[in-house]
């Protein structure tokens, strides 16, 4: 298939096997936030390499530790299989980039268990309910040409149809709520429907809750773990973030993602470190 | 120091370096639940190996994927450093056991970031409050000689002073509450005070919330991620588990651990798979 018919997300997360367990990727600057590429995008790239390396197709539980900032350009993903079971398989992946000096630097390392989400039992006894958010048409779409906090809006916003709950946008107007909450409607800008890999992006695509808690500047992720619990139904996703514990220079961000069928399709938690003052 | 002066936990989680990045451990059957050793205990063993292999002393964010059931006896932990930074370092660890046929089997794989928790900023702006639990003296201590659900109480209970909130013990009397909640006071039976490594045990030491949701039998952990957020103060810990999403044959268990100074010292989430019928 020609690239012209691929979605931006599929094109920019594609990997090509170059040796057993080794993959090449061409990372796109379209997914930048400031000078670094978004962590959820990079996790989706590594996740697609693991989907090829492991006998099961879908991420079930994926943990990633970010080691250094990633730039647009070529990258290599090396994978290793820890266990290939009947219903689940587990493996590691590392993403590297080569510097001008010819030396490889590891950007992130992943440990993940994969399964076939389509083969899971249909039994659902969740007690969780979708969080409240105004209808999509009442949540303004972030304008990729605007400025926020005196800085250009992240390049990545051009890839997304991201509509923040007006109740969690005070930070962008200089009036943070003080609550560790962020909520949005999330879709890919080119209309590509969600799948388990775009969920890995969705759990790390919103502005940080740290902004609503009065922090400014970059909030790099130390570690993120995502559980993909079901194949998402077509249509826009609702993503909610909450933070309860900002202490010792770190905060946790809990993400939940609901699909258009009101199913809790992903849960994630990250440990992040706000670098700007509060 | 003679083993006679070590706590059970320190003795049973000790590792001995046998080569660069490689460690030997003697896993104790005292931490068994049924036929397998407890996952939190095993994580503490791997965690101590990483504390030696990495330049920072304490687990900050630790993810583990369990691959096969671990038995008492010798084990080897092999570690690898991904990045050694100024304030944090990241590495992997795998724990192996050798079978009667001489073949090594990987039991678990860990990906972790370490830091010096004593060097973190003292700034605490957590909005989380400790959950409600009756005073310790009103929570009965689990009797290691008793039976629960017709089976002997797990051997590990002899190592713990675990006092369950009576409000979350209905499952043991055949009357599960239907709520995905479990709460307990937690200490080591021999009086050893908590530290970041015993917190790795504490987040996986309570009965599963699945029991209160009507499941019986083993609830093996697929993956667990723990954030250790502060050095715990001496004294008993309070550990609370909650489950919101039991679906597709899996459930998440969120753990929070509060110390005697009312500080949220650890947060963890695991993905588990109840094998018994509900």
Image (tube, coloured by chain):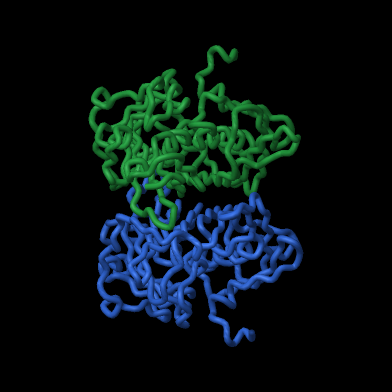
Chain colours: A green, B blue
On the image, the x and y values in percent for residue A189 come to: 42, 20
Which is nearer the eye, A13 or A209?
A209
Figure quadrant of the C terminus of chain B: bottom left
B160 above or below B5?
above
Tell me if residue A123 can be seen. Answer: no
Q: Residue at x 54, y 32 (%)?
A: A35
Q: Is residue B117 visible?
A: yes
Q: Is residue B5 above or below residue A45?
A: below
Left or right of B221? Residue A163 is: left
**x, y (%) of residue B9?**
54, 75
Residue placed most toward the observer, A167 or A63:
A167
Image side of residue A263 versus residue A1, left or right: left
Q: Residue at 66% across / 38% down in the picture?
A: A96
Q: Position of residue A245 (x, y in %)?
A: 36, 54
Total count of labels: 0
Residue B147 placed where, x, y %? 39, 75
Residue occupying image coordinates x 46% and y 48%: A273
Q: Residue at point 37% right, 27% down?
A: A162
The quarter of the rendered structure image containing the N terminus of chain B is bottom right
């Amino acid at each position: 298939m020609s690239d012209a018919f691929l979605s931006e997300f599929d094109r920019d997360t594609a990997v090509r096997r170059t040796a057993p367990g080794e993959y090449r990727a061409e990372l796109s600057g379209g997914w930048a936030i400031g000078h670094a590429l978004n962590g959820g995008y990079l996790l989706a790239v590594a996740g697609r390499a693991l989907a090829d390396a492991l006998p099961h197709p879908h991420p079930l539980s994926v943990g990633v530790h970010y080691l250094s900032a990633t730039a647009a350009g070529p990258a290599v993903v090396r994978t290793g299989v820890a266990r290939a079971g009947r219903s689940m398989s587990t493996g590691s992946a590392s993403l590297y980039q080569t510097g001008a000096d010819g030396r490889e630097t590891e950007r992130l390392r992943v440990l993940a268990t994969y399964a076939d989400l389509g083969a899971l039992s249909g039994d659902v006894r969740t007690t969780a309910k979708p969080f409240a958010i105004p209808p999509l048409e009442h949540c303004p779409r972030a304008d990729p040409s605007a400025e926020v906090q005196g800085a250009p809006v992240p390049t990545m916003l051009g890839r997304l149809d991201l509509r923040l709950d007006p109740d969690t946008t005070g930070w962008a107007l200089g009036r943070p709520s003080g609550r560790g909450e962020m909520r949005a409607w999330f879709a890919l800008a080119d209309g590509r429907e969600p799948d388990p890999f775009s969920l890995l992006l969705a759990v790390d695509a919103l502005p940080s809750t740290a902004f609503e808690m009065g922090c400014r500047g970059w909030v790099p992720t130390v570690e993120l773990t995502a559980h993909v619990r079901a194949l998402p139904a077509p249509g826009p996703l609702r993503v909610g973030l909450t933070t309860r514990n900002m202490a010792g220079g770190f905060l946790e961000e809990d993400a939940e993602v609901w699909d258009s069928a009101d199913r809790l399709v992903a849960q994630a938690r990250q440990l992040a470190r706000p670098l700007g003052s509060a």
